Amino acid sequence: MCGIIARIGGDDGAVDELLTGLENLEYRGYDSAGLAVKNGSGPEVFKRQGEISHLKEVLADEVPDGGLGIGHTRWSTHGPPSDENAHPHTDCSGDVAIVHNGIIENYDELKADLLARGHEFTSDTDTEVIPHLVEESLAEGADPETAFRETLEKLSGSYAVAMITKHDHAVYATRRGSPLVLGVSDGEYFLASDVPAFLDFTDDVIYLDDGDVVEVRPDGHRITTADGEAVERSVQTVEWDPEDAGKGGYDHYMLKEIHEQPAALRQTLRGRADPTTGDIHLEEFPPGTFEDVKRVQFVACGTSYHAGLVGAQFLSDSGVPAQTFLASEYATGQPPVDDETLVVGVTQSGETADTLSALRRANASGAKTLAVTNVVGSTAARECDDALFIRAGPEIGVAATKTFSSQVVSLALLGERLVRDVTGTRSPETRERLDALSDLPGNVQQILDYTSARRIAKRYHDSDAYFFIGRGAVRPVALEGALKFKEISYEHAEGFAAGELKHGPLALVTDRTPVFAVFTGRNDEKTLGNVKEAEARGAPVVAVASDANDEVYQHADEVLTIPETHPDVAGVLANVQLQLVSYHAADLLGRPIDKPRNLAKSVTVE
Ligand code: M6R
């Protein structure tokens, strides 16, 4: 997805800080990059298709002076990746420069009108209508802020925009459905789509509300609502530091984030569960919070959907009616909801458009909504009735890893609270399960220390296709294993319920299609039966299992061992092994692991 960064400072230094910000935004996925600096009079624009290094080459000969500027990484939606379509975009005179995330839905008609009035366009983008509309307001005598507001009134869609003009030393920006945060430092400010963009410079952040318009100058800022009413928004200090957001000596963010899981899980669990008493302490949700809930629906996409499947399975098994929906499908076939329905949006970023749309729909139908997210201040956290933070720390790699583990653990804790509130009883297995959860960080560390994932990836990484199977609580892990594998290796991978293999997919199984089978210690004999079906067709079998299961060892060509634990928790451990296999296979195949082609970290279009 596109990324915005703006730097608002006094005399100089904007370009270097904008480039740092752009590099920090790379993880969102992009195909071109650019910046505009206020240099003496008008904005000076530099932009290039491709990597930020291409933009740096353009700037290498001469870095322009200037303390104020806007920058952008583009992920194409309207018009292919090209120098012309890269942001910033300007008006006919070049006096107004704009960067934009999101989509202007009525750009076609706006553009037709502007062309008819003599404006000249240089790109295929929807964005370019914005500077031309500002140009018209300025020509009619409006000051830059008024021109900006008048333009916003003409736009429909969801977007975040930042603007500089030759007329004053300020950045004007707004967010309407796309994230935008304001970083506050000594004598300088930053605007960005995401906090890691400016973490090198400040950790003091103001989260803007949807509709806010902000005018930022080096010596101060002013926030107004969509109606023009001045508002104060509090400054919050984020706990992430730049080191957290850097690679810290690993070759890839993904590998670093896989290795951060013990620490992330400790944070997720900190103070929330007491295995000796079986008590759950979720800050925002004291006992009784969910007494009126009759059913739970999870809405999510991708990896978060797989975490949602685990959450729903746990609740259903414990007597609370629960279902999980792909957020993008929820809007069309939404099941009945009422004020006794709790709709839980599971979203790492809190900005996924499909998930936000499903949550808004649920909200409008009277359901209670709850965001389970990693990002404090995200749109999901702010729009839902409540939020539970998974505390995994920043995740930069496009492939979700540590956040899946922290989501599953958060949903397990939330599930315990829900079961008690809704059924009035506590599962006899609670203490055992909480024990297993508190052992998780150590168990994950054990896997990281002793895994044979690289050797196994080496053995199989030139196969024809890869299948992942699991039953019950680990069916979502099989789906997640396949998603991760295809996402970063570009190899064909599919995940199935173990029992479904024989109902069709078995036709694809050959001696060149390894089958990864996940075992938990529950219903293993049935999954083993499915493994034998694949084995009989010559498929290499890689089991993910604890060493307590002798028979599995006899039938597998390779085993990715996990420490013995409660069956409801085993999936998190198995998934770590599968993350490592995917990572090493992709590495051996020479893929760009942190930025897989065509994908973005945060998908803010439906
Ligand atoms: O930020 P979210 O959790 O809402 O993102 C949902 C999906 O886009 C995301 O999990 C995606 O599937 C990951 N790239 C998978 O690794």
Image (tube, grey):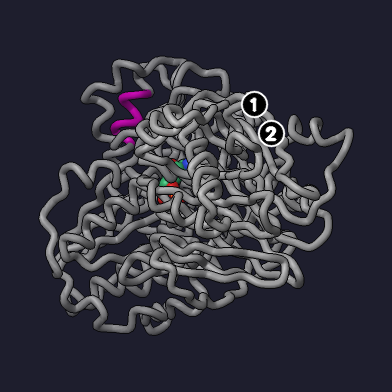
Residue 205, given in percent of the width and then of the height, sits at 60, 69
Q: Do the residues labelled 1 and 2 touch (CB within 8 Å)?
A: yes
Residue 538: image quadrant is: top left
* Residue with the mark numbered 2: 47
On whether ligand 1 comes within 8 Å of the CB at mark 1, the answer is: no
Horizontal relation, residue 63 to residue 234: left or right: right
Q: Compute the Cα span from label 1 to label 2.
A: 6 Å
Is 77 rendered above or below residue 196? above
Residue 83 numbered tag: 1
Label 2 element class: strand
What residue type is disc 1 on? Answer: Asp
Label 2 residue near ligand 1, CB within 8 Å:
no
Residue ranking furthest to the right: 61
Q: Is residue 561 in view from this perspective? A: no
Where residue 121 appears, x then y in whole percent?
A: 53, 28
Q: Which residue is drawn at 48% across and 43% down?
A: 133
Main secondary structure type of the part rendered in magenta: helix
Residue 164 vs 413, above or below: the answer is above
* 65 up-or-down from 34: above or below: below
**Image label count:** 2
Q: Residues within 10 Å of mark 2 (few under 14, many from 20)?
A: many
Depth check: give the residue in front, 377 or 462. Answer: 377
Tell me: 430 left or right of 319. Answer: right
- Residue lying at 63% horizontally and 52% vertically, measured from the top left: 259
Q: Which amino acid does label 2 sit on?
A: Lys
Q: Examine the structure image and report whether residue 533 is included in the region drawn in magenta.
A: yes
Q: Where is residue 365 in the image (x, y as percent from the top left)?
A: 16, 60
Instruction: Tell me if 172 is positioned left or right of 283 in this view.
Output: right
User: Residue sitting at 23 percent across and 62 percent down?
Assistant: 363
**Does the magenta run of residues contain 531?**
yes
Give the magenta-colored segment's residue range: 528-534
Pick whichever, 174 or 269, lies toward us.
Answer: 174
